[in-house]
Amino acid sequence: MTRQVSVSTAAYDGYSMDVAIAEIATTGAKWIEPAFISGYVAFDESIFCEQEGTRLASRLAASEVEALAVSAHTDLGADGAAVALRRRIDFCVAVGSSILITNSSDCHHPTQCVANIEAVLPVLEQAGIVLALENPGHGTDSLLPDGACICRITRKNRLAICEGQLRYRQRIHLQQ
């Protein structure tokens, strides 16, 4: 089995996405993870639309690379996060990615986090997108201290953990 390893554009913080894509492509990498992470990478929320996703897909194709995953973080425990997540799903589909990486929330907002996830589950399923959750980068008060925690938060059949596949930064996948 061939492993697909993505190189994050977060490593090119301070440079344009075009520079990041071109530089990563020169290394021979075939997979890029476009990163839109507040506090790490400068971006505007308006980028998360189908038109911008299609534009990014064209830029990737011109460099002969693809985006297996997109990091487009938002706090899923925040009010309105389901709307923000929906925009990110549309963007991810337009880019041609099958994995959307975002933050869960801190331990103070588990109910809202689960409600926001459940609100977009049909959209994720229809789009064929896997939602990969990370804990917020600060490392304290994590909602998901371990893989079993999300199972305690919700018992929906649509939510399942694929532990061990991507342990880096405590990534947890929500998939069928």
Image (tube, helix red, strand yellow):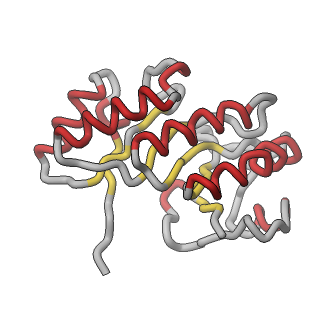
Residue at figure coordinates x 24%, y 28% from the top left: 18
Identify whether 96 is placed above or below 5. Answer: above
In the displayed structure, does residue 31 sit left or right of residue 128? Answer: left
Q: Position of residue 60 (x, y in %)?
A: 26, 40
Q: Could you say which quadrant of the image residue 88 lies in?
A: top right
Identify whether 168 is placed above or below 118. Answer: below
Q: Position of residue 175 (x, y in %)?
A: 63, 65
Which residue is farthest bottom? 1
Front position in the image: 158 or 22: 158
Work out which quarter of the rendered image holds the N terminus and state it: bottom left
In the displayed structure, does residue 175 sit left or right of residue 111? Answer: left
Q: Position of residue 109 (x, y in %)?
A: 84, 41
Identify whether 78 is placed above or below 126. Answer: above
Residue at figure coordinates x 76%, y 62% from the top left: 150
In the displayed structure, does residue 80 sit left or right of residue 47? Answer: right
Front position in the image: 54 or 137: 54
Residue at figure coordinates x 72%, y 47% from the top left: 120
Q: Could you say which quadrant of the image residue 24 lies in?
A: top left
**Residue 45 seen in render:** yes
Residue at figure coordinates x 22%, y 54% from the top left: 30
Q: Position of residue 98 (x, y in %)?
A: 47, 55
Front position in the image: 47 or 145: 47
Q: Could you say which quadrant of the image residue 70 lies in?
A: top left
In the displayed structure, does residue 149 sit left or right of residue 136? Answer: right
**Residue 170 seen in render:** no
Front position in the image: 87 or 159: 87
